[in-house]
Image (spheres, grey):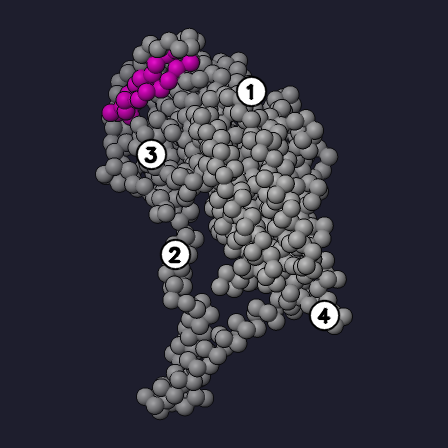
Amino acid sequence: MSISMALFSPPISSPLQNSNLIPKISLSLLSTKRLSLVSLTRASSDNGTSTPASATTVEAPTPKPVSVEEVLAESPSASENGAVGGEEIDMTTTMMTEIKFQDAKWVNGTWDLKQFEKEGKTDWDSVIVAEAKRRKWLEDNPETTSNDEPVLFDTSIIPWWAWMKRYHLPEAELLNGRAAMVGFFMAYFVDSLTGVGLVDQMGNFFCKTLLFVAVAGVLFIRKNEDLDKLKGLIEETTLYDKQWQAAWKEPESSSSSTVSSKK
Amino acid sequence: MATFTLKSFTGLRQSSPDQTSFVSHVPASPNLANRKLRVAVIGGGPAGGAAAETLAQGGIETILIERKMDNCKPCGGAIPLCMVGEFNLPLDIIDRRVTKMKMISPSNISVDIGRTLKEHEYIGMVRREVLDQYLRERAEKSGATVINGLFLKMDLPENWDTPYVLHYTEYDGKTGATGQKKTMEVDAVIGADGANSRVAKSIGAGDYDYAIAFQERIRIPDDKMTYYEDLAEMYVGDDVSPDFYGWVFPKCDHVAVGTGTVTHKGDIKKFQLATRNRAKDKILGGKIIRVEAHPIPEHPRPRRLSKRVALVGDAAGYVTKCSGEGIYFAAKSGRMCAEAIVEGSQNGKKMIDESDLRKYLEKWDKTYLPTYRVLDVLQKVFYRSNPAREAFVEMCGDEYVQKMTFDSYLYKRVAPGSPLEDLKLAVNTIGSVFRANALRREIEKLNV
């Protein structure tokens, strides 16, 4: 079976020079890996030619993992309750080479910035997207850490202005737009109701308070769910203190109270 | 004549136990007629052993009841440097000195911590059975009576000076045989019997949220063991634990690989598999020699004392958040509570009451509440989600952070750093959190 898989791998790699992800197809233990392999070929942009080849190889690992899963499932259940067994970790026996994250631009545990150059300057946007793709891959397929191939990438090498341009500025534009719309409408509304013009509104304490509330609202409540999240946050910040202070409260006449967080 | 004055004293004192227990200590508790104060310590772990030793040294008649003398409590086994000095631990109790730590983020970015440690600083790894036995022996040498028995329940006294009646099963060293049911009368009780404390149940101390810590002890080949010679690893990530971390800690001749969780206890096996997977290359070829699990309290019980019974250690819930450290705080609280009893009873001459024990609570909260609060904030902020954990690991690479973290861990003091560095740290933290969250938004865009 591994031989047949090896036969498959060369045709995949040769026609593709800019492939994002070259899966090392082999025995996969958990079923999620098979699913993510298929979804991965969908997600990667220029892996078109590899899809038919990898789709057929997906079938191949199916019979093997079942037996391995069974063995692994047995050992934890057999050794429950502190029994001193001599269970061998099945890693040596399965000879798994899992699908690891691979990318042409990921060299020695970090992104090779030279490969991201566009017109002589590093295209930081594509570095950010590449790192996001790597993290997404790892979230779906957790990998072992290894001393031979340590991950050394540090997001702080991407300059602050690249982050600003990509994330802060669009959001700031959105929020400022909202604030401006709310502000304009409220100014008009208050003016029509009370006759107080914009300049006089700014001098009034109540109007200044309303302005503050409007700005805070735009900043903190961006989605409908944020209201509940904020309430939960406020409760969360005081919960631990309450649990410590419980020893100093008056004991209730009924059975002991429990101050526990609701999860 | 003396008995007459004694009677008038008791008449005065009759009213006070019914009041709320915040009456300032009335120095009118009479001397115990012709005996010393009798205190029972239930549980012979670090808390019980330390409490019993301090009590015995203070001249109090101490009885320590422990159910399993050779208990291998499932435990990380890490003790800070200050514990060695404060409790005069012999250096051969420490199996390993960990001087390097590796923090590994969800995307396997690893950061080495420990560059700032000085020559003599380390985290001590101990075997619980060795440490517990040593502390119990020391208590015995100081004059405590150590009994191998299982505490069952206790009868609460009606008056302020009637004793507590403890019901326990004494094993008398025989294993496997069912022990003898016995009772004992004592004046005060220190509950040091751990997370599932029966003493706590007897006094209605209330419940707490707890985490399940699951650990497998794995014996790995020697060449892989050299990597863990003085290094411990911490893995963070949603796959490893949704609200805690997975670890690989070196022990005497094997490693302990484990993880824990509060909110998803049912998935603990899945998290353990994920932890083993993340460390796979480094523990390949290892053999599981033991599987163990134990609850870890997340916060103190609502009531940590009641009349003349006080809880210490895990029974009280003194485990920190974020790191899950409990051994030092157990021993220290045992000692603090015992000191309060010794002082309140004037070396065993007087009867004590709840206000003496409250002094121990006051001292404890005053000394350690800042530490607990800081760790709680750290857990809330940095164990929330994968981006937060990525930011956490990034921050740990900073030297200032490492220095502050180790200072506060090893010496248990929240040391004030320099304000300029604190400002830089705040800016860096915000930057890391922002970057990690930005990457998370990018990932979500990819999902669409």
| Residue B171 numbered mark, or none | none
Tell me the crowding category of disc 4: few under 14, some 14 to 19, or many 20 or more residues within 10 angstroms, Cα based.
Answer: few
* In this rendering, the label closer to the viewer, 3 or 4: 4
Q: Which chain is home to disc 1?
A: B
Classify mark 2: helix, strand or loop.
helix
Residue A263 visible to the viewer: yes
Residue corresponding to mark 1: B130
| Mark 4 to mark 1 CA distance (whole Å) | 62 Å
Tell me the crowding category of disc 1: few under 14, some 14 to 19, or many 20 or more residues within 10 angstroms, Cα based.
Answer: some
| Mark 2 to mark 4 CA distance (whole Å) | 45 Å
Classify mark 1: helix, strand or loop.
helix
Disc 4 residue type (three-letter): Lys
Is there a contact, CB below 8 Å, between mark 3 and mark 4? no
At 38% from the left and 34% from the top, the residue drawn is B304
| Mark 3 to mark 2 CA distance (whole Å) | 27 Å
Residue corresponding to mark 3: B205
Residue corresponding to mark 4: A118
Tell me the crowding category of disc 2: few under 14, some 14 to 19, or many 20 or more residues within 10 angstroms, Cα based.
Answer: few
| Mark 1 to mark 3 CA distance (whole Å) | 30 Å
B164 part of magenta stretch: yes
B239 part of magenta stretch: no
Q: Which chain is home to disc 3?
A: B
Q: Which residues are magenta?
A: B148-171
